Image (cartoon, rainbow, N blue to C red):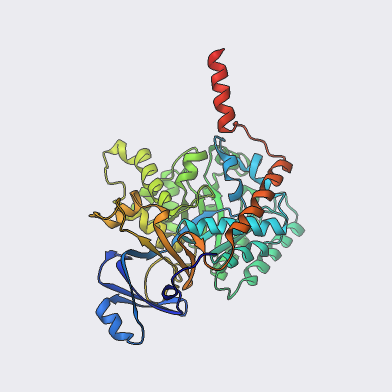
């Protein structure tokens, strides 16, 4: 556990940062009041202090107060095995993630999820949108893990029924589980229920339509991986005669309740379909770098009104590096060849890593910005560093230059969760030891098939081949 200043952990706070990152950009001479887990007041310092004379201002020179970031696409129970993905080609879920997650029991599901939640908080994420686990254990273990860590979570339940060959009984069982999941977390302060289908062809037409309708009625989010890899697009065409996004459109499953992950391989007609239906997208640039066939056209999303957030896809939970990757991938894939040096102007990636992510995750009414009435999910970031002390554009510097080690404090729902990178109310080191031991056993026992050697062995292979 980590000891933080008591003045930053009071039930009511009047914070006066050097800068506050509001929806329209950074402002100075601003004060923020946190009370009952929410932002109770935001505005010019003198006016806010006048309205709250009972509160003593906490001066925060050299600090920026900004919204916590939202990871719009995560797999919490895969994070502990992320280094197994290095050098692997696309669709590693078949060879790595399915067999690995199948080995998780309730206890390891909880511990691995809590460690992933800690990684997210350390990286500046106050919310993650989890796309569902294939583990056999009770998903309540994962909900408990994120809640204990203090991370807000949009928690997906996988609702695959196997496709159009499934029986009526199988479909009914899936939908009954889905209804129970949506009801299970009603009123929960930190866990928000969501339904998920791995890829559209993994479910029957009836279940795809029913799950989408259930989410629409419950104001929940329906998550699925769409147009991520060439193989998945072609598999859908063979199985259903339509590309994955086209299939969802034909079934009437698209809409504001839908969040598609990746969307890296889209036709012009599909981009228009996303915009016309209000469907959300998670742009996952690091996943494209690590194992993708393409980079989603996120800059076009912005211009054509497609709602989108940024997601890690369980690669690395570092919001600052994610924003940097979002800009860099977009620039290399699209902007350089058109002579566009701006590639989103910096603010695009900051906005969609915060409010845009909250919006597509279905919780934009709760979080994603520093505004009165929103839940107090925020960061205190040290900007008095050699790299940023001379900044002329705070927003763009946060995208390109800032690091997660500058995050001094992380708050979720008005409660400090981390101070200087470590929890203030639980023992992270003990959890790390437990997961380290269990992770190696789980990987050793799971029927994982890796196609690329670890780095040291690959170096040796290259040396041997050169000698030959």
In the rendered image of this protein, does residue 73 appear above or below residue 293?
A: below
Q: Is residue 88 left or right of residue 392?
A: right
Image quarter of the N terminus: bottom right
> In x, y percent, where is residue 450?
64, 35
**Name of the residue lying farthest toward the top:** 468
> In the image as oriented, which residue stretches furthest toward the bottom?
54
Q: Report if residue 8 is visible in the image.
A: yes
Residue at left offset 52%, top offset 44%: 228
Which picture quadrant has residue 65? bottom left
Pick whichever, 93 or 236, lies toward us: 93
The quadrant of the rendering that contains the C terminus is: top right
Query: Which of the two residues, 182 or 291, is positioned nearer the viewer here?
Result: 291
Residue for point 57% across, 30% down: 456
In the rendered image, the vertical position of residue 333 relative to residue 276, given as above or below: above
Between 47 and 434, the one nearer to me in the picture? 434
Instruction: Answer yes or no: is residue 164 visible.
Output: no
Q: Tell me the residue at 27%/46% (across/down).
A: 342
In the rendered image, residue 292, in percent from the top left (x then y), is placed at: 50, 39
Q: Nearer the viewer, residue 140 or 29?
A: 29
Q: In the rendered view, would you say 179 is above or below 102? A: below
Residue 248 lies, in percent from the top left, at 55, 53
- Left or right, 59 with reference to 283: left
Q: Which picture quadrant has residue 131?
A: bottom right
Total number of numbered labels? 0
Residue 153, located in which quarter of the rendered image? bottom right
Q: Residue at x 57, y 70 (%)?
A: 218
Give the side of residue 87 with respect to residue 139, left or right. left
Which x, y percent locates residue 440? 68, 45
């Amino acid at each position: 556990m980590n000891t933080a200043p008591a003045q930053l952990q009071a039930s009511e706070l009047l914070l006066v940062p050097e800068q506050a990152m509001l929806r329209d950009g950074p402002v100075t001479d601003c004060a923020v009041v946190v009370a009952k887990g929410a932002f109770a007041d935001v505005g010019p310092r003198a006016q806010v202090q006048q309205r709250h004379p009972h509160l003593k201002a906490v001066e925060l020179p050299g600090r920026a107060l900004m919204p916590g970031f939202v990871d719009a696409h995560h797999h919490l129970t895969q994070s502990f095995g992320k280094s197994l993905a290095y050098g692997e080609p696309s669709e590693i879920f078949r060879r790595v993630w399915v067999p690995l997650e199948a080995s998780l029991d309730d206890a390891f599901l909880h511990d691995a999820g809590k460690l992933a939640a800690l990684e997210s908080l350390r990286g500046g994420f106050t919310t993650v949108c989890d796309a569902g686990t294939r583990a056999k254990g009770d998903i309540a273990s994962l909900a408990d893990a994120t809640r204990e860590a203090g991370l807000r979570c949009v928690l997906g339940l996988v609702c695959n029924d196997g496709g159009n060959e499934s029986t009526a009984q199988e479909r009914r069982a899936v939908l009954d589980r889905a209804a129970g999941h949506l009801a299970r977390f009603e009123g929960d302060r930190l866990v928000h229920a969501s339904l998920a289908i791995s890829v559209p062809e993994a479910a029957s037409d009836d279940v795809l339509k029913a799950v989408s309708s259930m989410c629409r009625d419950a104001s929940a989010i329906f998550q699925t991986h769409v147009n991520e890899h060439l193989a998945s697009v072609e598999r859908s065409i063979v199985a259903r005669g339509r590309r994955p996004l086209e299939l969802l459109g034909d079934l009437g499953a698209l809409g504001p309740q839908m969040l598609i992950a990746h969307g890296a391989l889209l036709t012009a007609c599909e981009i228009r379909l996303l915009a016309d239906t209000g469907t959300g997208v998670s742009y996952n640039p690091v996943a494209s770098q690590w194992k993708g066939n393409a980079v989603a056209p996120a800059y076009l999303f912005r211009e054509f009104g497609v709602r989108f957030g940024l997601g890690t896809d369980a690669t690395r939970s570092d919001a600052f590096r994610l924003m940097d990757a979002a800009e860099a991938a977009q620039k290399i894939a699209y902007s350089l060849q058109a002579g566009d040096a701006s590639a989103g102007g910096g603010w695009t990636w900051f906005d969609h890593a915060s409010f845009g992510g909250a919006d597509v995750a279905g919780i934009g009414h709760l979080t994603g910005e520093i505004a009165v009435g929103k839940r107090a999910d925020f960061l205190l970031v040290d900007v008095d560093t050699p790299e940023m002390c001379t900044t002329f554009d705070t927003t763009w510097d946060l995208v390109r230059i800032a690091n997660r080690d500058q995050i001094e404090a992380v708050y979720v729902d008005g409660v400090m969760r981390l101070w200087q990178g470590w929890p203030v109310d639980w023992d992270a080191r003990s959890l790390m030891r437990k997961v380290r031991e269990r992770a190696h056993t789980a990987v050793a026992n799971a029927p994982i098939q890796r196609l690329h050697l670890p780095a040291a062995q690959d170096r040796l292979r290259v040396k041997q081949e050169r000698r030959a």
